[in-house]
Image (cartoon, rainbow, N blue to C red):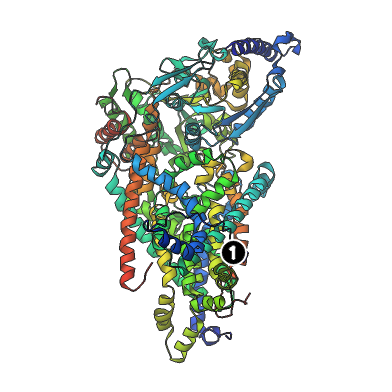
Amino acid sequence: MRRTARGIAVLASATLALSVAACGGEDKAAEEQPKADPASLTAELTWWDTSDPQNEGPAFQELIAKFNQTYPNVKINYQSVPFGEAQNKFKTAAQAKTGAPDILRAEVAWVPEFASLGYLYALDGSELLSDESDFLETPLASNKYDGKTYGVPQVTDSLALMYNKELLTKAGVSAPPKTWAELKTVSQAVKEKTGAEGVYLNPAGYFLLPFMYGEGGDLVDTGAKKIVINSEQNAAGLKVAKDLIDSGAAAKPSANDSYGTMMTLFKEKKVAMIINGPWEVNNVKSAPTFGGLENLGIAPVPAGSARAGGPVGGHNYTIWSGMPQEKVDAAVAFVKYMSSAESQAFLSEKLGLLPTRKSAYQLDPVKNNAVVAAFQAVNEAAVGRPWIPEAGQFFGPLDQMATEVLIQNKDPKAALDTVARKYKAEVVPGYGL
Amino acid sequence: MSRVKRPGRSRRSPVMSFLLHGTLILASLIAIGPIAWVLLSSLKPGYAIQSSELTLFRDTTLANYSYVLTGTNFPRWFLNSVIVAAFTMAIGIFFSATTGYAVSRFNFPGRRPLMMVFLVTQMFPVAILIVPIYTIMARLGLINTMPALIIAYLTIAVPFCAWMLKGYFDSIPTSLDEAAALDGCGPFATFWKVVLPLAKPAVAVTAFYTFLTAWGEVAYASAFIQTDNRFTLAYGLQQFVPQFNPQWEYLTAAAVLVTLPAGLVFFFAQKHLVSGLTAGGTKG
Amino acid sequence: MTTVTADPAPPSTPPGRSARPSRLRRSWEKHWYAWAMVLPVVIVLAVLIFYPLFRGIWLSFTNLNEANQVAEICTKSITGSEVCKENPNKWEFVGLDNYLRVLTGEVGEFWQWTGVTLIWTFVCVACHFGLGLGLATMLNRPMRLRGLYRVLLVLPWAVPAFVSAFAWKFIFNERFGLANAVLSAVGIDPVSWFADRWTSLFTAIVTNVWLGVPFMMVALLGGMQTIPSELYEAAEIDGASAWQRFRNITLPGLRPVSMTVILLGTIWTFNMFPIIFLVTEGQPAGQSEILVTGAFRAAFEGIRNYSLASTYGVLILSILLVFSVFYRRALRKQGEVW
């Protein structure tokens, strides 16, 4: 215990020195105290990064190089792991107590699940949470499980309405639609006047949440332990989505690879509006046919009859509980560095990622970033998801329902009832219907 | 035994010849169609691969190849795959040949159950076995090592190869074994010096099968291998196509580079796909 | 006398029955080399497959999952302490509950998945074998360009399967794919391949047939080498037609090999995970899911349900066991023994 306490003291001063240096660009003389010498920290850490290896990975590696300027003896073994397989891979390794990474970039929904299984260090009492109040509340909430905090938010996101400014202007529309009804009109106008399609809806559970939230619906009520997926509100939300497709305002979606189809059409200016998140901004920007960031409009998702809101997403830094205690100091130092306001600002500038610290939004690179500014409004409207260990299982049945309703013309209420039954039988048996 | 002229070209009528080649050309076209798509895509920049316009060529470039070869660990993955595939092939053939021979020739207790047991190993879905096998490999300290992969691939390859070789050994007359025994060969020598050379076509088939099993497998590799410098080719390739924002251009370029050696290996293996029996095991 | 690894196999009881020492010894003296030849394989399979398999059978009678598998859940704090709490719902023996839940359809879509799996397996294996046999017969004749044809036809096998799966998925893409482009060119309406379970399954079958034919072809080509050419020569002298030679010499001669490849081909196709998983993704709405992919999605999304996964595993195993027993019986009627 004493060792750790001292380690934290060392860290505190080290990070202080670091942030001073990073903010003002003053000389390194700020790190005077001999006790604070970060070079004395020696460890080798493995980090599984699940970000996009092509667009995002290099920026994280740059950040690691910067970290090593201050901590030359903490070696970070950077390993990019595809997002789609990281969850299973981590769990398999953590369960066998061999081969899991010391630090993992975990999707928001994974943290409560991993925490409930004992795979993560609780971070309470460490330097990482000393300025807890600086983190935005919703992203931080995804790290809490059973009264403890198991991760630090890295980046937050939500779904937004992304639109092609040129096409909307051509259609005579000056501002992006604010409600689903407006979206329908705009969409039809685009179709008539430009020849492009108005909007493409991805028939997947996550992407339909804005419709359900819009009418005031949700998946489950964690407080009352009740499954509310088959509520009238959700059915109404799905009807809105279904009507967009049936009326021809929205393009007819494919059952398979609809996400890729949506992105291809959007990048080729064949569809004017999509619902998607900030992770695709770089992709759209680099498409030679689209016309760059100037042509990309970002607005909050349209509102239903109750509200406007997309689901909160994002990623957190977590530390594997199987990591030996003697590496804790180094791991904390690393996560602290990566999640500092300056690092977040750096990532924001490079990649357009949304910081999770309030203080980061005060820094110039963030303030001056148009994409971040656009998404900030989006995020303020974002709806928190149920942060329970079972949350990862909600989307399988929901995706099936999306295909049934939007492609196979099944009645929304009936499809939702099926989902509710599946939740009861397979996901949250302890909840009421 | 003399070389036998098989019924063949000499007697084939022009119509038959046309039909034969026509069918084979059509089949070859179907076989290489999707591969041609992979090849053509590998020459395009990423945005032109999934596109609403179907084109054969667009903004042709070799940049994808140079990125794959220099910007990634591809050469290292290649080496790893060669090592894993070669060991799987060598060990796999050795074990399945001995097993197949024992089952074919000796009526030992446990012989028939053994063949059934081999089948059963193939019946339980791999997807469900991966987690427990990981735990075993972890206990053996084999996580993130190539032996883990080689052993796992052997469990797939050996049962099939043993069955295949057993069938083939069955068709080799036992009189040969008996003759060898009279010459003073023990069971191992008979197997090694007399029977195995005769079984060359079947060995070629199983060799190619084990090689490709190790060459293209992803599920075990993605569970057991954790660092970039230990990836096999197939698993390395998968890194190019994450759920969002897949890099088709690199995947296709790498796939072309992966397919070529496999094609070469087969080209040499197929020369052994000729009867070893009639030519007394001497034919090339 | 060099070759075999043969550290003499331990005198383990032969899988027959425990016998009097003398008999055991006789048996040992007579068969030790046979056992030595199969022992390494048996050890590897026992450790890697049979241990998990028997554990799986046991698990299918429990409710063990990722969350309840340990007796106590420990939370390590970054400050160095560790709190362990007893797991409130530790796993327990539940008898046949899992089977009941799966077979009654309370969990998953067992019967639908089984139906799709049977169709999928039958069609794939039939096409594999038919096409493979045809091509092998042709490629077994001496002719010009034989080596080239062989290599071209085997290429689909040489591409990593998941890459081919993506290639076919592109071909069947509803908006950008070649298949619909060709249909439109000849004046047929484009098809929404993945909006209907049968067209969706069709795309997966096409992919898998394309992938699997080269293997069958090569295996059968290898098998054809066992047929003594004297037989063909004699038949030719007797004036047998090509078809007669094929029916009466090639097919019977191929029996040992074709029996193996059909049997194992069926088992593999039944459990063929990546094609369905990647090409159709189970679309539309899980209707093209086969047993393995369905089981995987049911048990491995979110908190992993090991007991449920094992239950599916055991059911799959049972179906395949029944199949192979019948297959064996059918073969035995025709005089084949194994």
Q: Is residue C5 visible?
A: yes
In this rendering, the answer to whether B153 lies above or below C58 is below
In this rendering, the answer to whether A81 lies above or below B205 is above
Marks counted in the figure total 1
Q: Callout 1, which amino acid?
A: Phe
- The x, y position of residue C326, in whole percent, is 30, 62
Quadrant in which residue B262 is drawn? bottom right
Quadrant in which residue A147 is drawn? top left
Q: Residue at x 52, y 11 (%)?
A: A125
Front position in the image: A252 or A194: A252
Q: Residue at x 59, y 78 (%)?
A: B183
Q: Chain of mark 1?
A: B
For the residue labelled by badge 1, is the local secondary structure a helix, a strand or a loop? helix
Question: Quadrant where the N terminus of chain B lies?
Answer: bottom right
Farthest-out residue, top? A33
Front position in the image: C171 or B134: B134
- The x, y position of residue C150, in whole percent, is 55, 68
Q: Residue at x 43, y 41 (%)?
A: A258
Question: Quadrant where the C terminus of chain B lies?
Answer: bottom right
In this rendering, the answer to whether A145 lies above or below A170 is above
Please indicate whether residue A418 sits to the left or right of residue A319 in the image: left
- The x, y position of residue A393, in whole percent, is 37, 32
Q: Is residue C213 visible?
A: no
Q: Residue at x 39, y 63 (%)?
A: B112
* Label 1 environment density (alpha carbons within 10 Å; few <14, some 14–19, many ≥20): many
Front position in the image: C288 or C99: C99
Please indicate whether residue B173 sits to the left or right of residue C201 in the image: right
- The x, y position of residue A390, in whole percent, is 37, 28
Please indicate whether residue B126 sits to the left or right of residue C151 in the image: left
Residue under label 1, please give it.
B266
